[in-house]
Structures are given as structure tokens and as C-alpha cells.
Image (cartoon, grey):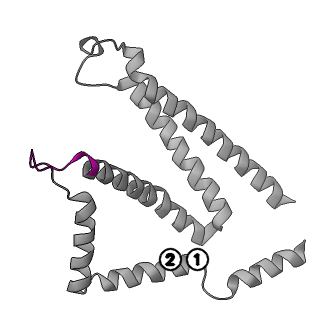
Amino acid sequence: MVKRAFELVRREESGLSKLETAGLIAFAISLLAMIPAVRDFGVNAIGTVFGQIDEDTGHVNDFSLAMRGIAITIGAVVVFMGSGWMVMWTNLGKRLAFLLAGAATFGWLVINGLLFVVYAPRGIRPANLEGLSALQMRLPAIAMTLASLVLFLMFTVALTRFEADADD
């Protein structure tokens, strides 16, 4: 068991780690973005997906708007979860950092979901919306809260098992 652990450490120390490789790729992309021709190509490539205009109305079309929403959601998840995970990875290791980042994220989602269920929606009253009661308007938030609670509990159980295995 100890011999295998030393072999894993030695293997991980040889060459560049995944984190170092990702950092070098990000650094290379940032350097390439300083070249005007490369930057213009990137802007035009992004514009073909996110800048499509509907000829009839002159506004951004539905496909482009949906792609913007998907890109913003993916970017927000990567930045929100990834930045904390990467900082913890440098200090705690990738497994423990993953478990802590997951537990923190889903714990935050449980609290956020509870606040949304209790205090939302502001603005249009549920009575003004045809066929939706106050409970029906909160069903997506309740479902998100319950799913996040289950995932939070799974991450905390995994953390407990990880600590028990580390003590052995």
C-alpha cells in the first residue's frame, strides 16, 4: 500500500501536471489574443454564433440568444466552482478539493433555493398569472433545493469516508 502511494507520487511529479498544462494553455491563448489578426479572427468566429441578427426584426435571433445563455451559464459554473477548486487543489490535493468544492457549491445552492422559495417571486403576483398558484410558481425552486440537498449530503458523506480512509 505504501509502495503504491510512493509510485503514484513519483509518477505525478514527472513532467507537467494537468494544472500546469492548463495554465500554460491559458497563458498561450492570452498571448495570442494580443496579436490583432488572431484577435479579429476570434471576434469574427464568436460573432457568427452569438451575433446572428433576425432580418425581419433587426434583433438578435433566438438561436444566438440561446447560445449566449448556454455560454454564460457554462462560464459562470467554471469560474464559480473552478476557481475555488483550483485554489484548494494547490493546498489540499485534487480529491479533497473536489469534495470540498462540491459540498460548498451544493450547500450554497440549498441556501439560495430556500431563500428563493421563501421570498420569491417579487413583481407579478401569482394571482395575475393564469392557472399558477403560489406553490406552483415555486415548484422549480423547491425541486432545485431538494436536488441540491441530496447532492450536498452525498458530498458530506464522501468527505466523511475520505477522512476515515485518510486516518487508516
Instruction: Determine crowd level at label 2: few under 14, some 14-19, many 20+ residues with C-alpha closer than 10 A.
Output: few
Reading the image, the residue beneath label 1 is 18
- Residue visible at 66% across and 46% down in the picture: 155
**Marks 2 and 1: in contact by CB < 8 Å?**
yes
Image quarter of the C terminus? bottom right
Image spot of residue 137 (x, y percent): 38, 21
Dominant secondary structure of the residues highlighted in magenta in the image: loop
Q: Is residue 23 above or below residue 118?
A: below
- Residue visible at 45% across and 81% down in the picture: 25
Q: Nearer the viewer, residue 51 or 88?
A: 51
Image spot of residue 27 (x, y percent): 40, 82
Residue 22 is tagged as 2
**Quarter where residue 77 is shown:** bottom left
- Residue visible at 74% across and 48% down in the picture: 160
- Element marked by disc 1: helix
Q: CA distance from mark 1 to mark 2?
A: 6 Å
Amino acid of disc 1:
Lys
The part of the chain drawn in magenta is: 54-63
Give the residue furthest to the front: 56
- Residue visible at 31% across and 25% down in the picture: 121
Image quarter of the N terminus? bottom right
Q: Is residue 51 magenta?
A: no
Image spot of residue 31 (x, y percent): 33, 86
**Quarter where residue 95 is shown:** bottom right
